Image (tube, coloured by chain):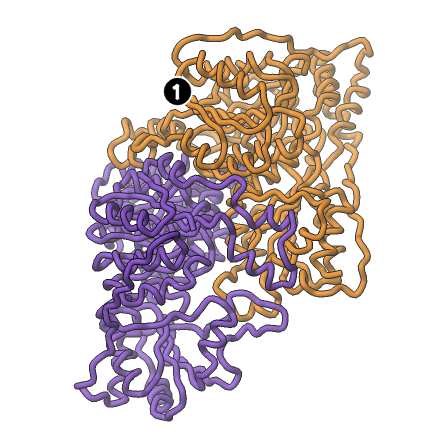
Chain colours: A orange, B purple
Amino acid sequence: MTGADILCETLLANGVDVCFANPGTSEMHFVAALDRQPRMRCVLGLFEGVVTGAADGYARMADKPAATLLHLGPGLANGLANLHNARRASSPVVNIVGEHASYHLAHDAPLTSDIEGLARPMSGWVRTIGSADNISGDAAQAITAARGAPGQVATLILPADAAWGEAQQDGIAVAAPARLAPVTEAKLNEAAQALRSGKRTMILLTGKALRDGALDTASRIAQFSGAALAAERMAGRIPRGAGRVAIERIPYKLESAVSFLREFEQLILIGAREPVAFFAYPGKPSRLVAPECKVMELAAPGDDLVQALENLAQALNLPTTLQPLRQERIDTGLPSGALNADAVHAVVARMMPEQAIVCDESITSGQNLLRITRGAAPHDYLPLTGGAIGLGLPMATGAAVACPGRKVISLQADGSGMYTLQALWTQAREQLDVVTIIFANRSYAILHGELKNVGAGEAGRNARRMLDLDDPAMNWVSLAEGMGVEAVRVATTEQLGAALQSALKRRGPMLIEAVI
Amino acid sequence: MTGADILCETLLANGVDVCFANPGTSEMHFVAALDRQPRMRCVLGLFEGVVTGAADGYARMADKPAATLLHLGPGLANGLANLHNARRASSPVVNIVGEHASYHLAHDAPLTSDIEGLARPMSGWVRTIGSADNISGDAAQAITAARGAPGQVATLILPADAAWGEAQQDGIAVAAPARLAPVTEAKLNEAAQALRSGKRTMILLTGKALRDGALDTASRIAQFSGAALAAERMAGRIPRGAGRVAIERIPYKLESAVSFLREFEQLILIGAREPVAFFAYPGKPSRLVAPECKVMELAAPGDDLVQALENLAQALNLPTTLQPLRQERIDTGLPSGALNADAVHAVVARMMPEQAIVCDESITSGQNLLRITRGAAPHDYLPLTGGAIGLGLPMATGAAVACPGRKVISLQADGSGMYTLQALWTQAREQLDVVTIIFANRSYAILHGELKNVGAGEAGRNARRMLDLDDPAMNWVSLAEGMGVEAVRVATTEQLGAALQSALKRRGPMLIEAVI
């Protein structure tokens, strides 16, 4: 077998059976190998940011990595921003990047660049394959690295001569299962003692601690101890809605986050990191907790978070009768009249089907999203984790590939949606069950706020030329239709309700431009 | 003044008066400074690949750098592919990337990443500013680095606290002029001797050696010595058309390039590098010249290429009566009937106005472009240099900003056009005089050819799913209109002729989707 065939077989043998791809010439032997192996589902993205963002969304919902396939350094570069988001979400991704044949590198051909150098900032693991005989072992190690706790981006660089070379032996290597470290007795005792202290305490969760069973345990601990629960901002997936344990997310805005955390004397981290300000501002803090707050880590990101919560429950000797506190269904009612962002959320909250997947890149328009959808039908919420805009549409694409039986609702700001709008084409090609709602405020609204924050007053001509998107206004209906996705523009809640109802009644992609 | 104001003043004082931008929160103090300084022209790109590709196109036509403004590591990452092309074109770019406040980095906030690490592979010069007091000196050095021969990407990283900090002194530093090294007598004698030897010789030119005056000298040398002239593939700008010195470009395809170079026993490099294969293929060479060909460098990329040609002409003692060989006007006539790529080129060649700027990312569709437009009206030709697709539309955008009095003709393959289609919006906003022709073959046609080359035969389902773009077909008319650019679809040469005539008669952007 060629190295390319072995790579394909190794991926499949280890459960990696989806490949989000945008290949080029140097990857053509691998494309030929994928062509010989119909078990691999190949999903084309028309830009690499779509490929990597889809791999992130897929991983968050499938709980296993997809492969990517990117073309040399520039193809990788185009995918880096969404790999950054995947890295912050601890999403497992087997990021395969083609490279020139090894002997060709010395010639510094036009497309040559330092691929390892480009990969490192956004990858937890990077390796360039030496030859066809190394491929299976290297690929298995990439898979091991990607899906090891808590999950990471593993970049595997595939030289063309390793792909086209015939391997001497055809063995397929097996990736190791994720090793989850148990928490220590000392940390357990520290956390249990803190929870018994009577001090105001927040438990900050992320990753696998934010799944139904673990959240139930966390809720019981919280009720028993009086602690509050919150989800880390970088958590990639949060179960929400009626019947689920209600959990807040640390707010984005510095002032709101500081206010949210101010009362707590103790913070217990379950796989999470201490929350910090998204951005620095003159004279304002980088840390968000009160200066005197004691921060303790019960479980590090790579630890067994689910077991850590179980152990903590045992250490606290929770009464078995104590039930988790579950969110009640809230009927938001349907607002009427002109649309604004909150009205969109209210319509979504009212109409959202059970087990929807809500992909959120609504940015400024999403300020009240979590509050308004709190009591909606149970759903999974997938946020922008690393702050690199352009994730929303690709993430929705990948989530839909992972969960073909579930409706994906993609809440998308217009400015960030423009970054990777090519994802709509993939949704059309794969007939993915995604309804996208564009919040068309025709502005980098968040930056107008930030400009005011720096004391610049009202934007003048140059600032408006950089922050406004209304000259010309983007026509998302045309853009979507250009990509093969049916679309409609709405300006009232009634129109939105009718459009959303139509989208929910059928399968396949649709886009709604909500002019707010 | 704040550091941000000083940066703005230093750019302006050194002739950098255009800023292609997509800022974020960490750049807001610099945005405020730009807002206070209306002499800086700020041009928004809705994706960073637009920003950097526009800076490349601007530099190629303006012969000076623009500034960019990018948001942190992910914003830089999104711009890297077109910085790669700029790097290969030796285009001067002052690439400004915002960074968190220096004290905030230790907290590894969600948007933190290794910006210097990301910048290095695509930059010739990288520096992170230390404080407001360093800004003017560092910015001047970035400008010096960018516009030093032969031109490069200089990445200046601007921490937010350096931008918002008040400088102790307000002096504005002056960038040094480019220092062009003269060629040595030894190299000059070697080249002159080679040209007198009677051996078959090619002179390979790039950069400033590809401007009218220098090309005239090169042509006289070629006629005198019997040498052939060619332009390096990575040359960013080639003057072409009637009245100009005709010059070939090294072909893209390996077999064509080898055949093009086979006869030559000597290759003289004027700022160019020895041509190498774009990609490696099993059993085929990486070098393109014949094995026995003697390669000699008269002038290195950083040398004074124009003077080198003058000196060579003197060393050869050219008769003053010897005139350059100029391309005659060729009227290609207008083909009729159904469109194909060559028919599009023929229509363009016939109708192209004087001093048009032709931006070429037509890829497979452009195989015969240079032959067909050889005798068109005089124009400048701006190719894809580094092979990172997604340059065409942004490059046309930047070229139009640099040359408001000239028509830009943007010849764009559909697959690569999808990478950075957001550039159309900037063309609409700035009312740039660009006519884009999309070669809608609805396929990564080049890769279908490459797949055949690797012996995989006809594409099966997985390969077709990765190489075909026809399911669904993209509707470029809708996409352009969604971005605010008027558009029309044509399927015959007559329709194309009428559409192009209409586009040429007016100013402002227009897109023609040519279904081929």
User: Residue A488: x, y in percent?
Assistant: 44, 24
| B390 and A425: which is toward the camera | A425
Q: Is residue B103 above or below residue B64?
A: above
Residue drawn 28% across the image and 43% down it: B509
User: Residue A470: x, y in percent?
Assistant: 32, 30
| B130 and B495: which is toward the camera | B495
Residue drawn 69% across the image and 33% down it: A62
Residue drawn 67% across the image and 16% down it: A245
Give the position of the N terminus of chain A as an image quadrant: bottom right
B72 to the left or right of A458:
right
B341 to the left or right of B316:
right
User: Residue B20: x, y in percent?
Assistant: 33, 45
- The subunit letter for the residue under badge 1 reads A
User: Residue A334: x, y in percent?
Assistant: 49, 8
Q: Does the rendering let one see residue B14?
A: yes
As shown in the figure, which amino acid type bears the numbered disc 1?
Ile
| B6 and A421: which is toward the camera | A421
Q: Residue furthest front?
A: B337
Q: Quadrant of residue A446?
A: top left
Question: Which residue lies under the disc numbered 1?
Answer: A516
